[in-house]
Image (tube, helix red, strand yellow):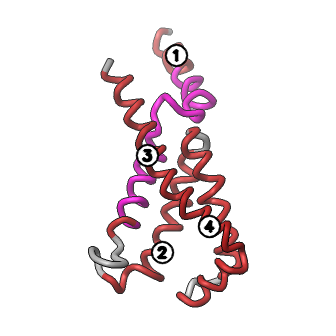
Amino acid sequence: MHTRVKDIALLLGRIGVAVVFFAHGLQKWDSGVGGTADYFTQVGVPLPTIAAVFVIVLEVFGSISFVAGFLLPLIAVGYVVDTAGALLSVHAPNGLTGTGGYELVLVLGLAALALGFNGGRLSLDHVLFWRKREARQAELASV
């Protein structure tokens, strides 16, 4: 019972984090690579066009993958890079709290990191990779 509740909580956490990234990704998608790169140039993001493509792909398609639980560690590390860039280039001067503060960016990045390396059994990563590994370990332990 406890394991099921944990797995559901992890899935809900992944959904919550991914929805926020997805919403921001759609805003950037609507602006296009050019518009997003122009904004990144204004705030001092290095390689703004490459960064814009990376962030749009990560926030839109990576969020879908995050909900499905596919390639969780890779997406989580991408989210951390994304949020670190946002924190340093936009939010840090505004402080932790208040208008434009970095509290949401910080929590999103760290929550994504935690969920990316512990996505639970309700994930494609578990079905495709971990379940087979657990079965082999159980088989070796019984020998």
- Quarter of the image where the N terminus is located: top left
Check disc 1 and give the amino acid type.
Answer: Leu
Precedes in sequence: disc 4 or disc 1: 4
- Residue at left offset 40%, top offset 49%: 114
Q: CA distance from mark 2 to mark 3?
A: 20 Å
Residue 57 located left or right of residue 11? right
Check disc 3 and give the amino acid type.
Answer: Leu
* Circle 3 crowding by C-alpha within 10 Å: few under 14, some 14–19, many from 20: many
Give the structural element (helix, strand or loop) at label 1.
helix
Q: Residue 55's mark?
A: 4
Q: CA distance from mark 4 to mark 1?
A: 42 Å
Query: Mark 2 sits on what residue?
Result: 86
Precedes in sequence: disc 4 or disc 3: 4
Residue 21, image x and y in percent?
52, 58
Check disc 2 and give the amino acid type.
Answer: Ala
Query: Mark 3 sits on what residue?
Result: 115
